[in-house]
Amino acid sequence: MMNKLFSVLLFGFLLGIFGGGISPALGANTDGNLADLSIQQAIANALAKNPMLEMAAAQAEAARNRTAQARSGFFPQVDLNGSWNRTTNPMWAFGTKLNQGQITQMDFAPDRLNDPDPINNFGANVSLRWALYNGGQIRAGRDQALLGEKIAVLGLARARQQVIAQTATVYAGLLMAGENLNVIKQALKTARTSLKMVQSRYNSGVAIKSDLLRAQVRIAKLAQLQTLAESHVETAWAGLAATMGTLANDRYRLTSSLETAQKLEDSLSTWIVSALHHRPDLEQVRYQVQIAGKAVQKAHGAHLPSVGLFGKYEIDTEDFNDSADNYMFGAGVRLNLFSGFRYTAGEKEARAMLAAAKAREYQTTLGIRVETESAFQQARSAFESIEVSSVAISQAEEALRIIRNRYQNGMMTIVGLLDAEVALQQARTNHFNRLHDYKVAMIRLMLAAGTIDQKVSDLL
């Protein structure tokens, strides 16, 4: 049993020694041929290639074309129509000959009127319809389309902000993964130094074998943690590549850092005011209220009279040897007197939807306030924890120095030494985690305030 345990410990020890330098932090920092990638460059790449923006841009283009369709109602509608028919129907046969200009005296004979010969007709006509007034329904529809176009453009702006936030968050996560890997490598270096000291004391007969085994177990555990940290780095690289729309195996040298952390200066009320003025999605909801108002106008217009022009120019022939033409034009007025309460119910529905849109606007406003305040409080508490974690590193380093000297002089057990090493490792990890948490909280706050596209470049 002891031999098996010793073999496992030896394997972990060798892995810690020879596997420590396999993967550089972030998978990139030691290769001088890699291109630099700052947070600004990563965001620029994402804005150029992220599929979310391509989708939002396509939706904005679709909205522009819907506006063009709605405007078409103001213009006359002109159609070219063609037809062919063959008939022996007495009424249609006589009318067809009349349209072709082929009526003769013999066609009025009762036998020919009652039992006409089959007749072909090739017809072509140009028709025109022009709605001059329909209770403002066309104008309301056009206004709705224009507002929908503005909503789509705002959707593109919000998608842009979300892509920026996503890229910055993933970039910060990659930095944290790299720093955590570096912390483990540094802990491995410290553990190997301690192992040499324990080995020397063991060889001198001062330390017992269990001290040596404990030091080797410590290195084995750190080797496992390094493997796990390297996998986290690779996963973070894949996430950044996906956000930027590039290949997953692309690597860069990251030039931005987690180290700088500027204190949150503006008050909560300032951030909330910014959110209520800059959030594209809130502006979208406000436009949706206006669209609902236009729907009420449109529904009310159905009760009003509609006036339009119509016309047609027609050519008819039987065999293309001869033809006749005619035209017709006129004006029409339509006023619905009773629709089974359909138009009345439609207007009531539109007014109910307007009330729902106003409630949705209020709900969105409240939600944005809560979102902004939550992000603000999280950012403020995260910043305060950074200084605490920084002090903890200094304290852990000093504690390890003292305990190492005491162990070397035989005044401390190996357990105390290893605990001090673990405490330093944890303090460093906590510090970078707190820096990361603050950056992510600030990204979330800027996104909540609708100003991330203006300020995120100053964060990393």
Image (tube, rainbow, N blue to C red):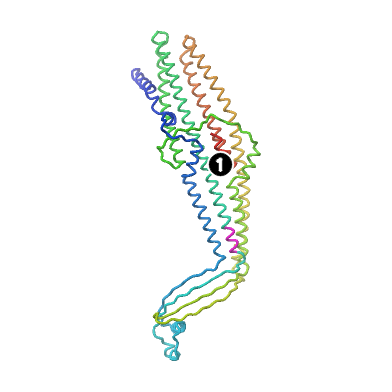
In percent of width and height, residue 421 lies at 48, 19
The residue positioned 51% from the left and 38% from the top of the image is 40
In the rendered image, residue 414 lying in the magenta stretch gets the answer no
Q: Does residue 432 sit above or below 316 in this rendering?
A: above
Q: Nearer the viewer, residue 343 or 241?
A: 241
Q: Which residue is identified by label 1? A: 453
In percent of width and height, residue 240 lies at 46, 38
Q: Residues within 10 Å of mark 1 (few under 14, many from 20)?
A: some
Q: Does residue 154 sit above or below 379 in this rendering?
A: below
Quadrant in the picture for the N terminus: top left
Residue projecting furthest to the front: 33
In the rendered image, residue 141 lying in the magenta stretch gets the answer yes
Residue kind at label 1, given as amino acid type: Asp
In percent of width and height, residue 202 lies at 40, 11
Which segment did they paint magenta? Answer: 137-144
The residue positioned 55% from the left and 51% from the top of the image is 153
In the rendered image, which quarter is residue 123 located in?
bottom left
